[in-house]
Image (cartoon, rainbow, N blue to C red):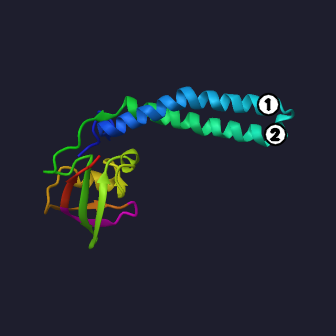
Amino acid sequence: MAEQSQGTWLSPATYERLQAELEEMTTVRRAEIAQKIEAARSEGDLRENGGYQAAREEQSKMEGRIIELTHLLENAHVSEPPSTDVVAPGNVITATIAGEEERFLIGSREQADLVNVEVYPENAPLGQAIMGLKVGDKTKFQAPNGRKIPVEIVKIESLDH
């Protein structure tokens, strides 16, 4: 199944948490870092000013996260976790993969903050291969090394928030 055209699936709780993080960064954190940069700038030679360099690096990382969050939130598909009838983004899956039982979330790393499991994006080879399957269904997915890996769906659970 192809990636949803609406973008990455997020639960309402995760969407709200990420919006709050973005708001904090674009208001409070930007101002704090600007003050750090200004204070360090007043200390003199910027080429050998460790405080200035550290503040600029912090600013760069934060601006990168702001861009990432803005894109994610603008393109997110927000809904409650789907039913557990079939594999879908937001479900926690127990599957036998190449003979080993694994438990993982189909979704984004932002959702992973809510559960302590491995995360596979829905557009990753494993995610694409199992999307829409039911408990007991078997398939194979192609690993990056080209190997076909067998998968059997054992359990489908809803993501708890």
Q: Nearer the viewer, residue 142 or 38?
A: 38
Q: Which residue is mark 2?
A: 49
Q: Are marks 1 and 2 in contact (CB under 8 Å)?
A: yes
**Viewer-nearest residue: 18 or 131:** 18
Determine which quarter of the picture holds residue 134. Answer: bottom left
- Residue 125: x and y, percent? 32, 54
Measuring from the top left, give residue 10's x and y in whole percent.
32, 39
Q: Please, which residue is most extreme toward the bottom here?
A: 99
- Say which residue label 1 marks: 41
The amino acid type, in three-letter code, at marker 2 is Asn
Which amino acid, mark 1? Arg
Q: How far from the left and from the top, in percent, is residue 145?
A: 40, 64
Q: Is residue 148 magenta?
A: yes
Few, some or many residues within 10 Å of mark 1 (<14, 14–19, 20+): some
Q: Is residue 130 magenta?
A: no
Tally of numbered discs: 2
Q: Which residues are magenta?
A: 144-154
| Residue located 62% across and 36% down the image | 60
Does label 1 or label 2 sit earlier along the sequence?
A: 1
